[in-house]
Image (tube, rainbow, N blue to C red):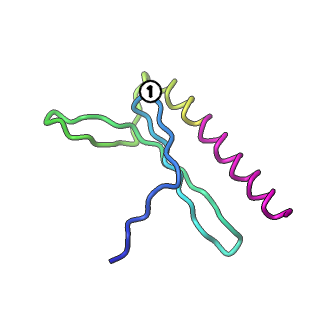
């Protein structure tokens, strides 16, 4: 049985979560990102949605900035590995 693929990194602020997915391609590693908002249903189960509320915008902006910083650090690391 194949193991379910997991994000290589998750960045969360408040109820907003960015998941960063790593994809191997013939051109090298590429990343994709999903942004979701976590919430609890009336019966207490955690769910997620891609819909955001106005009150989520500050969390979305902060998590997006942190995601960008992480992705840039990965790109810089990859360039350093290639130069070695």
User: In the image, what residue occupies the spot 28% across and 42% down?
Assistant: 47
Residue 54 sits above or below residue 40 on the image = above
Name the main secondary structure of what is drawn in magenta: helix
Q: Looking at the image, which is closer to me, 27 or 7?
A: 7
Image quadrant of residue 49?
A: top left
Image quadrant of residue 55?
A: top left
Q: Looking at the image, which is closer to me, 77 or 53?
A: 77
Judge whether residue 70 is colored magenta.
yes
User: Total of numbered circles in the picture?
Assistant: 1
Would residue 23 appear left or right of 4 to someone viewing this image? right
Q: Give the x, y percent position of residue 26.
A: 68, 75
Would residue 28 appear left or right of 2 to someone viewing this image? right
Q: Give the x, y percent position of residue 68.
A: 65, 41
The quadrant the C terminus occupies is bottom right
User: Which residue is the extreme one toward the left?
Assistant: 43
User: In the image, what residue occupies the spot 35% across and 37% down?
Assistant: 38
Judge whether residue 83 is colored magenta.
yes
- Please rate how many residues cluster around mark 1, counting C-alpha atoms within 10 Å: few if below 14, some from 14 to 19, many from 20: some
Residue 66 sits above or below residue 26 on the image = above
User: In the image, what residue occupies the spot 56% across and 55% down?
Assistant: 32
Q: Which residues are magenta?
A: 65-84
User: In the image, what residue occupies the spot 40% across and 42% down?
Assistant: 50
Q: Give the x, y percent position of residue 65.
A: 62, 34
- Residue at image mark 1: 56
């Amino acid at each position: 049985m194949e193991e379910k693929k997991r994000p290589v990194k998750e960045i969360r602020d408040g109820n907003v979560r960015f998941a960063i997915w790593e994809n191997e391609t013939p051109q090298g590693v590429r990343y994709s990102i999903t942004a979701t908002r976590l919430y609890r249903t009336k019966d207490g189960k955690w769910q997620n949605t891609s819909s955001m509320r106005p009150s989520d915008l500050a969390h979305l902006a902060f998590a997006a900035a942190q995601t960008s910083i992480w992705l840039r650090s990965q790109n810089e690391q990859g360039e350093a590995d290639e130069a070695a």
